[in-house]
Amino acid sequence: MKAVIGLGNPGIKYADTRHNVGFMLLDRIAGNEDVQYSKGFKGKFAEIRHQNRKIILLKPYTFMNLSGQSVAELINYYKVPLEDMLVIHDDMDIALGRLRFREKGSAGGHNGIKSIIQELGTQEFWRLKIGVGRPQKERDVVSHVLSGFDRESREVLSETLEKARKAVFLWLEGKEAEAMQNYNS
């Protein structure tokens, strides 16, 4: 069993924001698998099968800064080894349209990752970072990640999410090196 966790904030207000690219990617994965989410683990989760293996998809609904509470509940309940957990999140240090797979690492200033590291007591888990770029000089970080995408950026984001979906399925198949080689920008 593997777990794929997409970070974001619940509610219509945040649905199309930069901070919610993790949710957006899970919806793309679940949409292709035609599954429904259920409530649980302080969020919404779904089970899919890929190559005869159960995959749990999780959207923490604790808001970004407390994502670790939801993740820890799911991981402890299903006894998912941390090497079989992938967390998908936005990253301002990566340009829009770019992806980066990492096997482990610090939170890099991302509060959702910080919360997960705190709850799990380790930095040793896979991440797929989706670039959302830095804010313009006159805009603060919070306003940037909680804002939506313009038309041109939406097109780039759609292409990026499709690449990310393919990368996730490579990861699910145990082809981490191939995913990193093909999709790390």
Image (cartoon, helix red, strand yellow):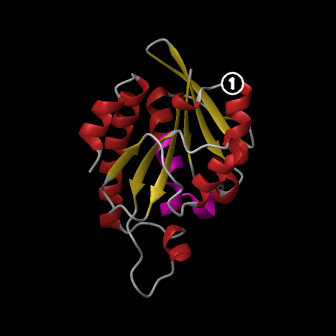
- Residue at left offset 72%, top offset 30%: 76
Q: Is residue 50 above or below residue 11?
A: above
Q: Is residue 135 left or right of residue 121?
A: left
Q: Is residue 118 left or right of residue 94?
A: right
Q: Main secondary structure of the magenta part?
A: helix
Q: Is residue 21 above or below residue 144?
A: above
Q: Is residue 37 above or below residue 91?
A: above
Locate residue 45, reporting x and y percent.
65, 35
Which residue bears the numbered disc 1? 78
Q: Is residue 107 left or right of residue 136?
A: right
Residue at disc 1, secondary structure: helix
- Residue at left offset 39%, top offset 23%: 174
Task: List the single residue furthest toward the top.
Answer: 52
Locate residue 18, reporting x and y percent.
48, 62
Which image quarter: residue 63?
Answer: bottom right
Locate residue 83, reporting x and y percent.
52, 30
Locate residue 40, reporting x and y percent.
75, 36
Which image quarter: residue 72?
Answer: top right
Span colored in magenta: 11-26
**Amino acid identity at mark 1:** Tyr
- For label 1, the crowd category at 10 Å Cα-Cα, with few meaning under 14, some 14 to 19 and many 20 or more, is few
Does the segment drawn in magenta span residue 136? no
In what quadrant of the picture does the N terminus appear? top right
Task: List the single residue furthest toward the bottom.
Answer: 138
24, 85: nearer the viewer: 85
Give the total number of marks visible in the rendering: 1
- Residue at left offset 49%, top offset 73%: 144
- Residue at left offset 68%, top offset 24%: 79
